[in-house]
Image (cartoon, rainbow, N blue to C red):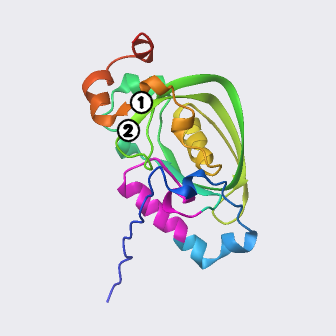
Amino acid sequence: MIRHPVFVVLKIVQVGEPVLRQKARPLSPQEIKSDALQQLIELMRSTMRDAPGVGLAAPQIGLPLQLAVLEDREDLLKGMDPQALAERERFPVPFTVIINPVITLHGDPVEFFEGCLSMAGFTAIVPRAHRVRVECLGRNGEQQVIEASGWHARILQHEIDHLHGTVYIDRMLSRSLMTVDNFGRHWKNKSIADLHRQ
């Protein structure tokens, strides 16, 4: 008899949960190599994909750990306006695990709408650095350095913020906050400059 892995989706906590405002603690080499953490990474991957999202940090599932996963799958980009993808420098990003990250920001801030699985149903313009360098540990505790720009850099900044108790609403242009429905109805095909003129 063939056994299939159980597909489990974890609960994503929403803004207002204290864990989203805590600084997460680093993971030790022993913890990283443990079966429990490796299983947690798989659960986070399935939860992120189910949402669907492009990143998920451990605090978003109620765990104050310096651990996040990200993946911008090709199927999420299908059907999107090619011009919008180019403007955002958004390309597929393979599944990545970041543990105990240290981020360095480079380049002038770039503004785009951003959402969060822990603030479901809303979006806002968030200025983010165009490029980043992230030094961290990988899934098995190996040292890794990630150099990223465009949307990949934005995802990294967003998830690493979660590990420090920061949510995108702390960085957003406050007048740009809106429901995802109203974004689709009124702003989807307009520029950031249009919103600044309001």
Q: Residues within 10 Å of mark 2 (few under 14, many from 20)?
A: some
The region drawn magenta spans 40-63
Q: N-terminal of the two: label 2 or label 1?
A: 2
Reading the image, the residue beneath label 1 is 177
Depicted 87 relative to depicted 169: above or below: above
Q: Please give left or right for residue 145 compared with residue 12 in the image.
A: right
Three-letter residue code for mark 2? Phe
Secondary-structure class at tag 1: loop
Q: Where does label 2 land, which residue?
A: 122
| Image point (70%, 33%), residue name | 105
Q: CA distance from mark 2 to mark 1?
A: 7 Å
Q: Residue at x 70, y 61 (%)?
A: 25
Residue 167 against residue 19 in the figure, above or below: above
Q: Quadrant of the N terminus?
A: bottom left
Give residue 9's quadrant in the image.
Answer: bottom left
The total number of labels drawn is 2
Mark 1 belongs to which amino acid? Leu
The disc placed on residue 71 is none
**Image location (x, y in percent) of residue 84:** 40, 25
Whether pointer 2 and pointer 1 mark residues with C-beta atoms closer than 8 Å, the reply is: yes
Given the current orientation, which residue lies at the most extreme left position? 185
Where is residue 92 drawn, in percent x and y?
A: 47, 41
